[in-house]
Amino acid sequence: MCYSTAVSFSSAIVLTGGGLICFKKAQGLHALQGVFPLLPLLFGIQQGIEGLVWWSLGAHDPELLRASALAFLLFSHVLWPIAIPFSCYLAEPLQQHKGLYLLLTLLGAVFAISTYGPLWLHPGWLLVSDVHHSIVYKTTLLYDTVLPRPVVTLAYTVIVLLPLLLSVRHSYRVLGLLMLLGALLTAAMFKLAFVSVWCFFAALISLYIYYIVVVEPAPEIGTSP
């Protein structure tokens, strides 16, 4: 996230606390909610990890920097593109949408393997720096020789947001719209640090999950939302 170690750790505390309350109120994980009750908590953990990235940058500790950066990108490049469309697949009452959500889940898995795996194998493919008070994760991707980076970013955005935007549940669509607005704002104002800043905006927006899993429980399959 932007600004400092303190901001990342403070947001981690708020999100983790809210996430624990959300998970408790939701009474655990259910098939029709998927990973959604855990999202605020998971985003809180991710923000705490980015606090470690800030810390390691300031301490000039390359080993901790690489480990914490890889841990942060595990959420952004692996967990979110798989867990979010799959949770929409579980929660969707309309059968005609389920096939698309499952396809997006599989595409998310392909994206995760092809973008995150090489970062482990090639240390030089991940460079982390502080630019204008924002953390920049500069990565080399297998697709760089055949696809412009904006195309890859667009594909990632579609995998993560399209299931939310197409959901028959109003609250899911609202969540998708909020995250889309966060992505557009980040692309316009923080393009260089897109991964870090959008994850922060998404983390704050994830507190809306409390409404989704507690105030408006998921409908049973085959019933109206």
Image: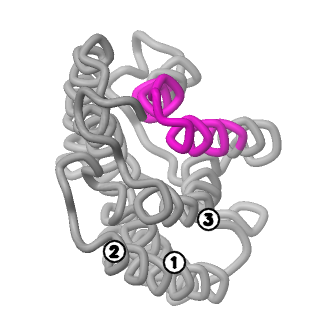
Nearest-to-viewer mark from 2 and 1: 2
- Asked if the residue at tag 1 contacts the one at tag 2, i.e. Cβ–Cβ closer than 8 Å, the answer is no
Earlier in the chain: of badge 3 and badge 1, it is 1
Q: Residue at x 21, y 52 (%)?
A: 120
Q: Does dot 2 land on a helix, a strand or a loop?
A: helix
- Asked if the residue at tag 3 contacts the one at tag 2, i.e. Cβ–Cβ closer than 8 Å, the answer is no
Tell me the amino acid under the disc marked 3.
Answer: Leu
Where 54 falls versus 13 (above or below)? above
Q: Which residues are magenta?
A: 158-181
Q: Quadrant of the C terminus?
A: top left
- Disc 1 designates what residue? 15
Q: Residue at x 41, y 10 (%)?
A: 146
Q: How is the image coloured?
A: one colour
Magenta span: predominant SS is helix
- Disc 3 designates what residue? 204
Q: Where is residue 126 shown, x and y percent of the image?
A: 39, 51
Q: Which mark is residue 181?
A: none
Where 5 falls versus 199 (above or below)? below
Q: Residue at x 28, y 55 (%)?
A: 35
Q: Residue at x 51, y 47 (%)?
A: 138
Q: Determine if residue 125 is in view.
A: no
Viewer-proximal residue among 152 and 81: 81
- Disc 2 designates what residue? 23
Q: Determine if residue 90 is in view.
A: yes
Q: Quadrant of the N terminus?
A: bottom right
Q: Where is residue 125 shown, x and y percent of the image?
A: 36, 45
Seen in the image, is 185 located left or right of residue 183? Answer: right
Q: Residue placed farthest to the front in the image? A: 223
Viewer-proximal residue among 145 and 77: 77
Seen in the image, is 135 located left or right of residue 80? Answer: right
- Asked if the residue at tag 1 contacts the one at tag 3, i.e. Cβ–Cβ closer than 8 Å, the answer is yes
